[in-house]
Amino acid sequence: MIIFEAIKEVIMQKPIRLKQPVFYKSDSDSQKQLERLKQLYATASEQNKSQIQRDMKLLSYGISGEENVAFELNNSYLPLITLHDLRLEYEGLSAQIDYLIITPKLCLIVECKNLFGNITIKQNGDFIRELNYNGKRYKEGIYSPMTQNTRHLEMVKRIGSDSKKNGLLRASFEKYFDDNYKSVIVLANPKTIINTKSAPREIKNQIIRSDQLIAHIKKLDKESKNLASSEKQMYQQAEFFMRYHKGNPKGYMEKYAQAPRIEDTKIYQDLKRYRYETSQAEGIKAFQVFTNAQLIDVITRMPNTLEELKQVSGFGDMKVDKYGAEILAIIEKNRER
């Protein structure tokens, strides 16, 4: 039976045992980072909470786009091996690949973008986003995912080439690299309109919607002149890339870990001490001088003048006249540190 299947593989150019898509690596650093940010948010200072919320929103948006791709792959019924969120590190360089998909004939490097707004790709390859906001239309250039994926392919090529100890094998790998490795850009937002009329053909052929991914994979495999790999060979290729995968050790947690809690800063302690001493001298409650929320707002704004101090909620003319000079002196002292 094994001999028969091996012969059938050669004749049919299809792997025999792999009958459905397999996620060789399915976890994601993005999902882990999101969970950590949720935990961090619960104990974060007011100063950091708004930024953490923005980071969580962006992460959630990106994760949603990648989940659309995962859904399409899981329901494709194709013999595929997929590595999700692959972070390759090699000789001081790194590449974050959303999906590396190994088909019987090809290896696809997939960059997933859950972009909002409508996208037009110009003749020179520039990506232009068009947005409607409050009844007005805005246009802006955005970083090209093509450039990003080109760098990913360069990293994959370098790793693969350097792994070939035989000069002939290395030369062959580099010569046929473009035949074996393909770039795919998936725009995962179903509401986004993509205008590729003016785009160069080599760019147009790489950009698809998530619901077009499976048809695109079938088309690429059908057009390829490569011999189909066996299941064993496909797994060996997946294992090869996993050897270079390193989980992101830093990310958002380090970003916020490096920033001290606002309550631990010198300026916070100085303003809090001034508030206490002032309230004791006037025989009033500390919050009547200024509240904790006002204290944090002062530090966030770091006003230079009395007029700027009046921009802080709760600091009217009377309070600024009474406490403003001393508050600005504390700010200036801490600004010099």
Image (cartoon, rainbow, N blue to C red):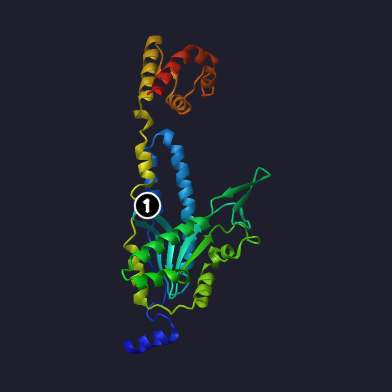
If the image is split into quadrants, where does the N terminus sit?
bottom left
The residue that appears at 42% across and 72% down in the rendered structure is 80
Q: Element at badge 1?
A: helix
The residue that appears at 49% across and 52% down in the rendered structure is 61
Using the image, determine if residue 291 lies above or below residue 186: above
Residue 326 appears anywhere in the view: yes
If the image is split into quadrants, where does the C terminus sit?
top left
Quarter location, residue 135: top right
Residue at the front extreme of this rendering:
167
Residue 36 x/y as whole percent: 37, 47
Residue 75 x/y as whole percent: 47, 70
| Mark 1 lies on residue | 32
Q: Nearer the viewer, residue 86 or 133?
A: 86
Q: Nearer the viewer, residue 37 or 4?
A: 4
Using the image, determine if residue 283 lies above or below residue 70: above
Q: Nearer the viewer, residue 58 or 220?
A: 220
Q: How many marks are shown on the rendered structure?
A: 1
Q: Nearer the viewer, residue 142 or 194?
A: 142
Amino acid type, label 1: Lys
